[in-house]
Each structure stands twice: as structure tokens, then as C-alpha cells.
Image (tube, coloured by chain):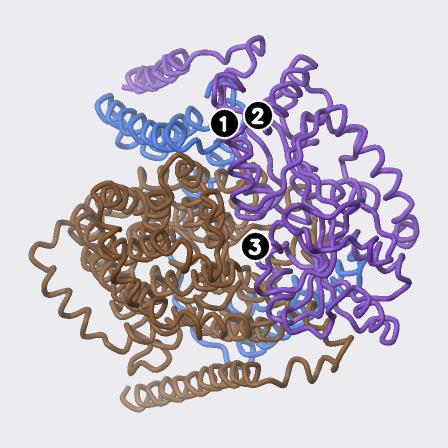
């Protein structure tokens, strides 16, 4: 902490500040482009840092990482397509808000909550790195397996409609994740066509599942008369929104805490942090029905979780040289080319560079909020784009984003096919969020189960391996609580609906 | 039978078909996870089918489906995909944009409107080109031209 | 009215044609390369191969090398199979699509699986690195030497779990060699890449592992490095013995060679040009300094040397994997 304050001014050199601001603005735009996930954006920029001073290069990468995580929310809110998997939860309430003419307010909520979560995450990183690093190493195959199961238990709650449909959609996603070569055993599975050999990558699937149904629905609606909602800049709502936003203490704190914890777990990544936090807030809310219809609390929890994960996700990387997420892996490359080996040495021998990097991450959170809010003022112009032009532009972006992930035309075909299936699914009441969650969690669940079983067979046996150990038991208990509460609230709602129907009958 | 019951039936059939294809997986350990998921999916689908057969809920009337517009867009996208690797991303995208707005928006078609669309499409693909192709060297499908 | 609509559409097409001409036709391959060259990396961004590939090609745009940048494209999946299959089947053969190779990974895969590639479909143009596999155990492990580990394994067949970066990669080959040479049975745990495999060892979730020398070197505070699967000790780790010195007859067949290939069918002029330029570029002082700073062992080899190495590995691996292959088919 003392070191952090000592080195803080070094982040403030003019050149570093300039790079920071440019990185943040660029990152917001990149993040808003579907397909350009934070990982991709940082990977694109690593070569630029070859020729920079180590500290400046890292400031750039840190700024871009922070800003792309928040930038993904812009497209989620404005055009109903998450910029990265982490922004799915933002979309659930953010887009309905935008459709009601409150795009600007939704974006303000998004950036303010991002700042709160981001600063919380950075504080966790600055104060609690050693214990958190130890916790992160506790997660082995069995713990990761249960984390995935916990994620699956969240699926039921992500549909505004029926729980069963949420679960079936989730199972479908889990099956999609199996397509291609099994990562551990290299056995081909469900490769019905050549384009599937590489499996279904998460980002193309995400784009397909959200963007393509959106494009088709825009086409449906464009024959109707334009909606009577007027999209114009909302003036003078900044202070009011800040006050209102900060009053959602429960959403912000659940989001920040869940995001930080999940950030520390290597391999889980922030992709699921927002959704898990969102589900908790919704479950324990007084009126869970309001979620998914434009409740700003939903945006607050999703975005605070999302950005809270940034700081902690770097802990395993910086202290143990184990990148906990794909983005951290790319950042590792950025450190290595400057001869900075992560690990305890980083804080001893390269303290100046390391703390400049950490300080710039804090500053980037603030810059992200400021520039994000400035950009939000122009959000109404996106909402004003007529449906027809929007449909065409979104299709182009979807294809661009998909192709650029790994330069694969196969991915584009897969994306469009999945999207078309999802459009039909959406017509009969399925939602995209559980499907994406299934695709993300499938690989985590299966790999860790197989790995755990291999290890357990040489030792204590599968039952003991997966069902003992305090961390395992804690996560299992959380799963049980989550499922139990879902069933309970489902029954309660069913009873309520029945009572209402009866009352209606009696009345008529 | 109401709509949700049919959806449940379709999912159940899908699970059965997928279960039948499991035999193609050579390594038994690699088949275990998909098998578990398929069984779970089949069980949930059966549950949904039963739920809606036994306790059918009255369902709201669906609005007529605009098949011509959605189907039309579907066909244009297919053509666009086929063109991508022939003429290249940027040009194909420009043509796609113009095709969508001109064909789907034929009611609004005037010279002025077409010009403004064309301008919009050029600016849009141009921004993509400069930002990603020139500055960041992102790869897009290459065709004859760019 | 209809005519007018037709005219407007015609105008749109004319505009498109004008645009085409403005961007010009692609130039021919005479003055190769006249546009950026793509290079397929068959592993995900951030892995050792990806990182080193970006590093050794950063000078490509200098005029004395290619004069054009090399753009890295990641196509990960199935231990590299997805990317290499794509490279041979769908990649362009005009010299503008290169790929990185990892030996022994691709050779072993081509022996065991029905892949689209083998040593005859690749035209190597240069090798930049050689990363030997090292045998690592957690810091608090009871094993302090290879002998301890082998003795325990003899008493408890299959009880030692040993992680590596996947199936039929260098680490797996090293594990197979160790088992064969020492006459023990270990349980190999294939992981998704070198990083998770390393993490399993550091956190003690597995009892041992084979991993890249470069990554293990950076993590030596949190690990015990027991031996190196190479013919000689390495300059980064002079105190670590080779497996041979420890009395286990394992050669350098698992050493992970990294370099660049063109697909078969690429223009001979391009093969000649790149075979000349790449080894020089890899040996550039700037590249060498960055490789060393990042703890990545460099080994520059020319086309002829690489072809020879490919052939030697092919023969050896066919022998080692013969039994496994029979089981598969």
C-alpha cells in the first residue's frame, strides 16, 4: 500500500496520461463492437507496445482492458447485442430501458456502476493480494466443477418465462459446447459437418445468439408504425442518476463482491460474474418480476460485477504468473516482452513499473466513467437509426466481429446457423442468455470433471474427491441454496397466480 | 395440444435423435458428459410436455408472422455470405447494405433516399475499413478487391 | 416511375464499380511480399507459442527483412489440429499464409490421428526456438529427485499423477518416454494448455508434471525442477540434470521446436526467399534480446536443418507410438 502511494505519481506523467486517455476512448469503441472482446482488443494492441517504454505500454494495455470491459455494455444497451460475454446480464434490463427512451440513463447507470465495481475490485487487489492469491490456488478440478454446476443452477432464473425453458435452453448450450474435438481426449464429437470441426467458439456463438434474432425482429417490426417513444437527449439527469444509482447499495455491493470473488478464480473468467450476481439480486428482490423489463437495478448489479472482476483477475497473474483468464494470458505476453516476469520479483525488482501499471488501472476506471458518460449523451442518435438500416448495419457488424475472432469463415456460418435457430427458439419462448451460459460452462464442467476423475482414481476415489474439502462443500451448499430458492419462489409465484385466477373467476 | 406442448415434444424428439448419434463417439469417456446432458434435456422436455398436456394454459393469439420480410432478409444474408469470400468483406458489405435497404424499403425508394443510403453505407464501411483494416490490421474475408 | 427506380439502382451499382476500381486490382506475386503476410498460430493468444511468434516476427516490416508486417491469426483447438488442418486444406498457397509449427506435436498427431497434414505437407522456412520439457513437482513435494519419484512409482503403479499441455504434445511424449525408460506406470493428465498444467502442479492438485522449460524457469520459486528431457543441461538452469544423467534413458525427442512453415504448393521463389530471410530475422540482435529477456530459449535453424529434424522425429515417434496407433485403429 505504501509502495502504491509512493509510485502513484509516476503514472501521472504527461505521456502516460495521454496514452491512458487514448486507450480508454479507443477501448470504449472497441468494446462496443460486437466480437471485439477485451481479450481480442488487448491482443491487437500488444504489438504496439513493443516500441514503447515498459510502463507506458502497460498503461495502454491496462486502459484498454478496463475500457473494453465497460464498452461492451454500450452495444448491449443500445442494440441488444452484448459486446462480450460478460455483458449479457447488462442487456437483460439495459436494452428494455433503452427501448423506453431511457438509453442515456441506462448508460449512466452502466458507467457509474462500472466505476463503483471497478474501484472496489482494484481496492481488493491493492489491499488483499496475498490472501486472494492463496484462495485462487485452492481451486482445483473438483472446485471448478462445482462452480460450473453453480453457474448451471443460475440458468433457470435467466428467462422471464418458464423455468423449464430456461433449463432446456441451458442444456442445449451445454451440448453445443461439446461440439468439435474433446479438449482433453481429442475425440471428435457431434461433428455433423466440416464447419464444426473447430467446435463452436464462445464469441461467435454469442454474436449469433443475440445479433441474428435481433436483426430478424427488427425486420418484423419495421412494417409497423414507428414507436411513439421519442429518442432525444435527456438533459440534466446526470446528478439525479448518480444519486439514484448510488442508492442501490444492495445491487452494487452484491455485484462488486461476487465480481471480485469470481475474478480471483482462475479459468472461470468474468464471463459469468455478471450473470451470477444478477441472479442473486433478482432472487432476493421484493419484486423479481420487474427484472428483465428495464429495472435499472439489473444494470447496476451486472456492470458493477463485470468491472469488479478486472482487478482481482490480475492477482493470479501478477503474483503467481498464472493468468486466470484469457485476457490475463494476453497481458502476460505484454509483460514478458519487456522482461517483466510476473511473480514476487515483479513487486520487488520492477516495483516502479508494476505500481505504475496498477495505478493506471485505477485511473483508467475513472477515465472510463467520465468518457463513457460523455459518450452516452450521443446515445439517442443510435436509437434513432431506423430499423431497416439498423438491421443491415448490425448484420455487417455481426459478420465482421465473428470473422475477426479467428479469421474463420466457418465461424460465420456457425454463427448465422445458431442465430437462425435461436430466432425460432425465441418465437416459442426460449431466451439466449441460458444458452450462452451453457456454452461457456460446458467446457469448464466437463474438463474439470474428467480431470478430477483421473486424479481421484489414482487416490481417494471420485466420491471423496468431489464431496469433501471445505471449499467443495461451500460451493455445493451454494448450489443447493440457489436451486432450492428457485423452486421455492416458483411454487410461490404459481400459487399467487392461481389465487389471482380464482379471485378473477369469483369476481366475474 | 397447445404450442408449448408441441415445443416439449420437439425437444424430446431432438434429445432422442442426439442420443442415437452418441454411438459415433469412439472414446467412452468423451461420451459420458454429452450423454448426461442429453438425458437431462430429455427429462426436462418430457416434463414440459406433460405439464402442458395436463394443465394447458390458455395462450394469447400470435400476431401474423411476416414471412415475406423475414424470409427475404434471410435470403439476402445467404447471398451476402456466399459473396463474402468472392468479392471481399468491405465491398460485399456495401452491396449487402444497399440490397437490404433498397429491397426491403422499396416503398420509400426515391433517388434522394438511395443516395443518402449509399452515402451512409460508404461512411459505415469506410469507418470500419480505416479503423480495423488500416489501423489495427484486423483480417476480414479477402476477395478479388480488398 | 419504375424506370426511375431502375436508374437509381443502376447508379448504386455504378458507384460500387467505381469503388472497386478505386481500390485497384491486387498486384501479382513478383515482388513478394507486397501486402501483409498472415501467420496461423494453432494455439490461443497468450500461450508460449503465440507470444514467441509475435515476438520473433515483430521486425518483419523492416526493409532488410520482409518490408511487410506479419499478422498473427490464432486458430486454436484440439492441440493444434484445427489450425493445421485449416492451413493445409483452406489456407492460400500463394505464400501469404504461413503457419507456426510445433515439433513433436504435429508429427505425433499425424501419426496417431487422421490429420490432413504430416511432414510432407509442410515446407519449413526456419526454426526460432527449442523449449525442452522439464519434470516439475510442487514446492512441498516429498520427491527431491527423479530417483525418489521413480522409486515411489515402482511401489505404487499409476498413483503418480503427471500433468502436461495435452494429448500427443511434447510433454506427453516426454511422459511416455519416461514411463518406458524407467519401466513405471504414471497417470498422465492432459490439460488444455501449458498454463493450466503448470497451475495444477504449483497448487499441488497433481503430484508432478512435464512443462515448458521457459515457463518453469519463470516459476522456479514455486516449483522443484527435477530434470530436463534433453541431451544437455540448459544455460537457464545449469543446476538441473538431464534425465540421462539421472540414469533414465530419455533423449531430446520431446523438445518443443517452434518455427514457421509454408504449405506444400507454395511458389518455390517464396520458399527460397523466406528460408533466407527468416533465420536471419530470428537471429537479429533485437529479437535475441527480447527472447532472452522473456526467458524463452532461442534456437535458430535453417530450412535444411529443420527438414532433417522433421525426418528424424518422424522415424522415432513412429516407433514410440506404434502400440498406441494399433490400439486406435
Q: Position of residue A389 (x, y in %)?
A: 31, 37
Is A47 on the left or on the right of A303, as rendered?
A: right
Q: Residue at x 27, y 53 (%)?
A: A364
Q: Nearer the viewer, mark 1 or mark 3?
A: 3
Secondary structure category for the residue under label 3: helix
Secondary structure category for the residue under label 1: loop
Q: Nearer the viewer, mark 2 or mark 3?
A: 3
Mark 1–mark 2 Cα distance, whole angstroms, equals 7 Å
Instruction: Please name the residue that numbered disc 3 is placed on.
Output: C218
Instruction: Please name the residue that numbered disc 1 is placed on.
Output: C59
Q: Position of residue A33 (x, y in %)?
A: 36, 44
Output the letter for the chain in brown.
A
Which of the numbered marks, if any, corresponds to residue C281? 2
Output the letter for the chain in purple.
C
Quarter occupied by residue C163: bottom right
The foreground one among C218 and A442 is C218
The reply to whether dot 1 and dot 3 touch (C-beta < 8 Å) is no
Is B52 on the left or on the right of A123, as rendered?
A: right
The reply to whether dot 2 and dot 3 touch (C-beta < 8 Å) is no
Which of the numbered marks, if any, corresponds to residue B108? none
Quarter occupied by residue A238: bottom left
Q: Position of residue A268 (x, y in %)?
A: 51, 65
The foreground one among A125 and A37 is A125
Q: Are marks 2 and 3 on the same chain?
A: yes
| Dot placed on the residue nearer the N-terminal end, 1 or 3 | 1
Image colour for chain B is blue
The foreground one among A503 and A182 is A182
Mark 1–mark 3 Cα distance, whole angstroms, equals 25 Å
The reply to whether dot 1 and dot 2 touch (C-beta < 8 Å) is yes
Is C275 on the left or on the right of C313, as rendered?
A: left
| Dot placed on the residue nearer the N-terminal end, 2 or 3 | 3
- Considering the image in quadrants, where does the N terminus of chain B appear? bottom right
Amino acid at each position: 500500500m505504501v509502495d502504491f502511494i509512493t509510485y502513484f505519481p509516476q503514472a501521472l506523467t504527461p505521456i502516460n496520461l495521454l496514452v491512458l486517455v487514448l486507450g480508454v476512448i479507443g477501448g470504449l469503441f472497441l468494446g462496443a463492437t460486437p466480437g471485439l472482446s477485451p481479450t481480442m482488443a488487448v491482443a491487437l494492441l500488444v504489438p504496439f507496445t513493443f516500441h514503447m517504454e515498459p510502463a507506458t505500454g502497460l498503461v495502454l494495455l491496462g486502459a484498454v482492458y478496463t475500457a473494453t470491459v465497460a464498452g461492451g455494455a454500450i452495444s448491449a444497451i443500445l442494440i441488444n447485442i452484448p459486446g462480450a460475454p460478460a455483458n449479457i446480464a447488462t442487456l437483460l434490463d439495459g436494452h428494455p430501458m433503452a427501448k423506453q427512451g431511457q438509453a442515456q440513463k441506462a448508460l449512466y447507470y452502466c458507467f457509474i456502476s462500472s466505476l463503483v465495481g471497478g474501484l472496489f475490485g482494484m481496492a481488493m487487489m491493492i489491499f488483499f493480494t496475498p490472501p486472494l492469491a492463496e484462495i485462487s490456488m485452492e481451486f482445483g478440478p473438483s472446485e471448478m466443477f462445482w462452480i460450473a454446476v453453480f453457474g448451471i443452477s443460475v440458468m433457470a432464473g435467466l428467462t422471464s418465462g418458464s423455468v423449464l425453458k430456461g433449463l432446456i435452453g441451458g442444456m442445449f448450450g451445454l451440448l453445443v459446447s461439446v461440439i468439435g474435438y474433446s479438449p482433453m481426449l481429442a475425440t471428435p464429437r457431434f461433428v455433423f459437418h466440416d464447419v464444426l470441426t473447430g467446435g463452436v467458439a464462445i464469441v461467435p456463438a454469442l454474436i449469433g445468439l443475440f445479433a441474428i434474432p435481433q436483426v430478424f425482429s427488427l425486420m418484423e417490426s419495421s412494417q409497423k408504425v414507428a414507436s411513439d417513444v421519442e429518442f432525444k437527449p435527456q438533459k440534466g439527469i446526470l446528478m439525479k442518476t448518480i444519486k439514484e444509482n448510488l442508492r442501490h447499495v444492495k445491487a452494487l455491493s452484491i455485484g462488486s463482491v461476487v465480481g471480485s470473488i469470481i475474478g480471483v478464480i482462475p479459468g472461470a473468467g468474468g464471463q459469468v460474474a455478471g450473470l451470477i450476481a444478477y441472479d442473486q439480486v433478482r432472487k432476493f428482490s421484493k419484486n423479481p418480476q420487474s427484472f428483465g423489463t428495464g429495472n435499472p437495478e439489473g444494470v447496476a448489479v451486472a456492470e458493477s460485477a463485470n468491472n469488479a472482476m478486472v482487478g482481482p483477475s490480475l492477482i493470479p497473474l501478477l503474483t503467481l504468473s498464472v493468468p486466470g483468464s484469457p485476457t490475463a494470458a494476453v497481458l502476460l505476453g505484454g509483460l514478458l516482452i519487456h522482461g517483466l516476469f510476473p511473480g514476487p520479483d515483479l513487486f520487488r525488482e520492477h516495483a516502479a513499473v508494476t505500481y505504475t501499471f496498477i495505478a493506471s488501472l485505477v485511473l483508467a476506471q475513472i477515465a472510463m466513467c467520465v468518457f463513457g458518460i460523455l459518450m452516452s449523451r450521443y446515445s439517442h442518435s443510435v436509437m434513432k437509426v431506423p430499423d431497416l438500416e439498423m438491421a443491415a448495419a448490425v448484420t455487417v457488424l455481426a459478420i465482421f466481429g465473428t470473422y475477426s475472432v479467428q479469421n474463420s469463415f466457418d465461424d460465420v456460418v456457425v454463427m448465422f446457423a445458431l442465430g437462425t435457430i435461436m430466432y425460432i427458439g425465441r418465437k416459442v419462448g426460449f431466451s439466449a442468455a441460458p444458452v450462452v451460459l451453457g456454452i461457456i460452462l460446458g467446457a469448464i464442467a466437463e474438463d474439470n470433471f474428467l480431470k478430477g476423475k483421473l486424479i481421484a482414481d489414482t487416490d481417494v476415489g471420485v466420491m471423496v474427491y468431489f464431496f469433501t474439502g471445505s471449499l467443495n462443500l461451500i460451493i455445493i451448499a451454494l448450489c443447493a441454496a440457489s436451486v432450492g430458492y428457485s423452486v421455492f419462489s416458483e411454487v410461490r409465484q404459481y400459487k399467487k397466480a392461481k389465487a389471482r385466477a380464482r379471485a378473477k373467476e369469483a369476481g366475474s | 395440444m397447445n404450442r408449448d406442448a408441441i415445443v416439449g415434444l420437439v425437444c424430446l424428439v431432438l434429445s432422442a435423435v442426439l442420443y442415437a448419434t452418441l454411438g459415433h463417439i469412439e472414446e467412452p469417456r468423451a461420451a459420458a458428459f454429452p450423454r448426461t446432458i442429453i438425458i437431462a434435456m430429455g427429462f426436462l422436455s418430457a416434463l414440459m410436455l406433460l405439464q402442458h398436456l395436463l394443465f394447458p394454459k390458455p395462450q394469447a393469439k400470435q400476431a401474423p408472422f411476416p414471412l415475406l420480410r423475414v424470409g427475404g432478409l434471410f435470403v439476402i444474408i445467404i447471398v451476402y455470405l456466399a459473396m463474402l469470400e468472392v468479392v471481399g468483406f468491405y465491398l460485399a458489405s456495401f452491396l449487402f447494405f444497399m440490397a437490404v435497404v433498397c429491397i426491403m424499403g422499396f416503398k420509400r425508394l426515391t433517388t434522394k433516399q438511395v443516395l443518402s443510403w449509399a452515402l451512409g453505407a460508404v461512411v459505415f464501411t469506410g469507418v470500419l475499413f480505416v479503423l480495423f483494416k488500416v489501423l489495427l490490421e484486423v483480417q476480414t474475408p479477402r476477395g478479388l478487391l480488398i | 416511375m419504375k424506370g426511375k427506380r431502375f436508374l437509381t439502382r443502376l447508379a448504386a451499382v455504378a458507384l460500387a464499380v467505381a469503388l472497386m476500381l478505386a481500390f485497384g486490382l491486387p498486384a501479382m506475386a513478383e515482388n513478394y511480399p507486397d501486402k501483409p503476410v498472415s501467420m496461423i498460430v494453432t494455439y490461443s493468444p497468450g500461450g508460449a507459442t503465440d507470444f514467441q511468434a509475435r515476438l520473433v516476427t515483430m521486425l518483419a516490416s523492416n526493409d532488410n527483412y520482409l518490408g511487410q508486417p506479419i499478422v498473427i491469426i490464432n486458430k486454436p483447438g484440439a492441440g493444434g489440429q484445427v489450425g493445421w488442418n485449416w492451413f493445409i486444406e483452406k489456407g492460400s498457397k500463394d505464400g501469404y499464409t504461413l503457419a507456426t509449427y510445433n515439433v513433436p506435436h504435429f508429427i505425433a498427431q499425424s501419426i496417431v490421428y487422421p490429420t490432413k497434414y504430416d511432414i510432407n505437407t509442410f515446407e519449413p522456412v526456419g526454426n526460432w526456438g527449442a523449449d525442452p520439457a522439464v519434470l516439475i513437482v510442487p514446492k512441498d513435494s516429498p520427491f527431491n529427485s527423479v530417483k525418489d519419484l521413480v522409486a515411489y512409482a515402482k511401489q505404487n503403479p499409476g498413483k503418480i499423477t503427471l500433468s502436461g499441455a495435452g494429448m500427443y504434445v511434447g510433454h506427453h511424449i516426454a511422459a511416455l518416454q519416461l514411463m518406458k525408460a524407467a519401466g513405471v506406470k504414471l497417470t498422465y493428465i492432459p490439460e488444455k494448455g501449458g498454463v493450466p498444467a503448470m497451475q495444477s502442479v504449483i497448487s499441488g492438485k497433481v503430484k508432478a508434471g512435464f512443462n515448458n522449460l521457459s515457463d518453469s524457469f519463470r516459476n522456479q520459486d514455486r516449483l522443484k525442477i527435477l530434470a530436463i528431457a534433453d541431451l544437455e543441461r540448459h544455460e537457464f538452469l545449469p543446476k538441473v540434470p538431464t534425465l540421462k544423467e539421472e540414469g533414465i534413458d530419455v533423449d531430446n525427442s520431446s523438445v518443443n521446436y517452434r518455427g514457421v512453415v509454408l504449405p506444400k504448393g507454395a511458389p518455390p521463389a517464396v520458399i527460397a526467399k523466406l528460408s533466407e530471410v527468416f533465420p536471419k530475422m530470428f537471429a537479429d540482435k533485437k529479437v535475441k534480446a527480447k527472447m532472452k529477456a522473456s526467458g524463452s530459449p532461442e534456437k535458430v535453424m535453417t530450412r535444411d536443418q529443420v527438414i532433417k529434424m522433421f525426418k528424424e522425429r518422424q522415424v522415432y515417434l513412429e516407433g514410440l507410438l506404434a502400440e498406441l496407433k494399433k490400439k486406435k485403429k
